[in-house]
Image (spheres, grey):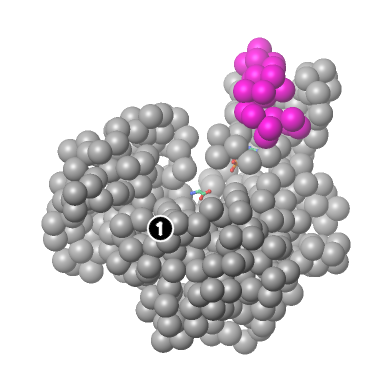
């Protein structure tokens, strides 16, 4: 089978690496890809907002499955266009991708289905939002409704800061995403991520992970797309995972199906483990980046039949073996990230992969045949071990083998679990 993978990050490199191992793969294409993906796939230039062009490419190359990595093409309805043209696609429809594309949609669904989440109010104007603040206490959680590249959430410590943020959101400071704002109750606890694969009916729990969103060691500094992750996250015990499946994932999939927009793909739940139990923070309609990298390192099964089964409604009974070992990934970013990253810095990977580590490419480019930095998050250095402590040691050994003078990384990925493992 020929497969087309869309995206250019470390998530897509990890997917390409796993797809390329499949005996059922004939040829892998990626658009636009990156230099790491190019080792596994033929990279092609395709405008993913031009649905007709993507469909034409699929016809010409006899593509049997399209795998969509990032959220934007999902929210833009590319899956619907491909399905209408008879091309199987891993990724939810536009209606189902509202679980990521509209925070208000997800909160309303949680309310209808009795899914545990923070109390909330949806507001449509600055006046309405200001008035609603009175129902909440500091810290105030303010969320621009639409896609905002991970920057749509502000936690305001004071009422004055909350009012200022609301004025900014409704004033266009968050683009179209801020036309509606959700105000939420603040939840306390430790965060963890949970992934479930579904074909719209059958659901397969696909493991847990913990991300590190802040740019600096000790979870300091501004939020990023994620500076590192590990999987599994033992804080999400088997008992808690069973609750997440029963109280959050299953009712979501059932409600989406009952309401006429079945969810097909991977459902990525951001969770807060509160004193009352796990509560949903948000959904993403795609794999996490860098969470995907650690999940793919652990996956022992062939990825192609799994993604195809989600796409075609035949997930029931498909073999999915996620190894019990721990995988941990460290993001190496270019100086300046998450602000303006320095581009063009030279990179030498040296023998980083010597001890079984895998270096996934994110924002890299080739310049005169040499590898250079070409984005904020640049490399995802990933290793496995018997526990987080061991995987962390191996990942940093690989990081230290790399020469990347204009790069930086956090030195404490996995710290919560490493501390627990020390006892
Ligand atoms: P989101 O983009 O919805 O995942 O939010 C980004 C981050 O804001 C989350 O990872 C949490 O750290 C934090 N956050 C979001 N909603 C809440 C909430 N209701 N209570 C506490 N923290 C929250
Ligand atoms: N690492 C978080 C995300 O992919 O949304």
Question: Can residue 162 be seen in the rendering of this structure?
Answer: no
Asked if disc 1 is less than 8 Å from ligand 2, the answer is no
Q: Is residue 422 above or below residue 2?
A: above
Q: Is residue 159 magenta?
A: yes
Residue lying at 61% horizontally and 79% vertically, measured from the top left:
309
Residue placed farthest to the top in the image? 160
Image location (x, y in percent) of residue 378: 32, 46
Q: Residues within 10 Å of mark 1 (few under 14, many from 20)?
A: many
Residue nearer the viewer, 250 or 38: 38
Give left or right: position of 251 versus 61. right
Residue lying at 67% horizontally and 34% vertically, measured from the top left:
177
| Label 1 SS | loop
Image location (x, y in percent) of residue 328: 35, 58
Query: Which picture quadrant has residue 267?
Result: bottom right
| Location of the C terminus (image quadrant) | bottom left
Q: Which residue is mark 1?
A: 33
Magenta segment, prevailing SS (helix, strand or loop): helix
Query: Which picture quadrant has residue 349?
Result: bottom left
Image location (x, y in percent) of residue 385: 30, 67
Q: Which residues are magenta?
A: 158-181
Give left or right: position of 64 versus 141. left
Q: Is residue 30 above or below residue 417?
A: below
Question: Can residue 314 be seen in the rendering of this structure?
Answer: yes
Residue lying at 38% horizontally and 29% vertically, measured from the top left:
340
Give left or right: position of 219 versus 369. right
């Amino acid at each position: 089978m020929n497969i087309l993978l869309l995206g250019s990050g470390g998530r897509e490199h990890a997917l390409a690496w796993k797809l390329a191992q499949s005996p059922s793969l004939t040829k892998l294409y990626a658009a636009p890809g990156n230099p790491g993906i190019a080792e596994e796939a033929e990279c092609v230039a395709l405008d993913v907002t031009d649905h007709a062009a993507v469909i034409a490419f699929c016809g010409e190359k006899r593509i049997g499955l399209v795998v969509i990595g990032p959220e934007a093409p999902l929210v833009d309805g590319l899956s619907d266009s491909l399905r209408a043209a008879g091309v199987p696609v891993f990724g939810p429809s536009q209606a189902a991708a509202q679980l990521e594309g509209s925070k208000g949609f997800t909160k309303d669904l949680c309310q209808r289905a009795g899914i545990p989440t923070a109390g909330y109010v949806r507001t449509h104007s600055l006046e309405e939002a200001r008035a609603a603040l009175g129902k909440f206490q500091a810290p105030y959680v303010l969320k621009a409704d639409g896609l905002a590249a991970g920057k749509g959430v502000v936690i305001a410590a004071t009422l004055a800061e909350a009012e200022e943020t609301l004025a900014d959101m409704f004033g266009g400071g968050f683009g179209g995403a801020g036309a509606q704002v959700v105000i939420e109750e603040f939840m306390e606890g430790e965060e963890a991520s949970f992934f479930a694969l579904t074909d719209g009916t059958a659901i397969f729990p696909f493991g847990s992970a913990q991300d590190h969103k802040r740019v600096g060691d000790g979870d300091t500094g501004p939020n990023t797309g994620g500076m590192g992750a590990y999987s599994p996250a033992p804080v999400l015990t088997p008992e808690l995972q069973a609750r997440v499946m029963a109280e959050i994932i299953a009712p979501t999939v059932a409600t989406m199906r009952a309401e006429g927009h079945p969810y097909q793909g991977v459902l990525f739940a951001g969770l807060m483990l509160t004193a009352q139990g796990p509560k949903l923070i948000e959904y993403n309609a795609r794999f996490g980046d860098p969470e995907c990298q650690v999940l793919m390192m652990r996956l022992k099964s062939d990825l192609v039949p799994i993604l195809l089964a989600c796409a075609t409604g035949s997930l029931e009974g498909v073999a999915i073996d996620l190894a019990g070992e721990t995988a941990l990934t460290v993001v190496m970013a270019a100086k300046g990230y998450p602000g303006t990253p320095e581009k063009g810095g030279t990179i030498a990977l040296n023998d980083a992969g010597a001890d079984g580590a895998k270096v996934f490419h994110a924002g890299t480019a080739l310049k005169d045949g040499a590898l250079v930095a070409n984005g904020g998050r640049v490399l995802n250095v990933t290793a496995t071990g018997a526990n987080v402590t061991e995987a962390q040691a191996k990942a940093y050994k690989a990081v230290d083998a790399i020469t990347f003078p204009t790069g930086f990384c956090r030195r404490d990925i996995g710290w919560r679990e490493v501390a627990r493992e020390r006892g």
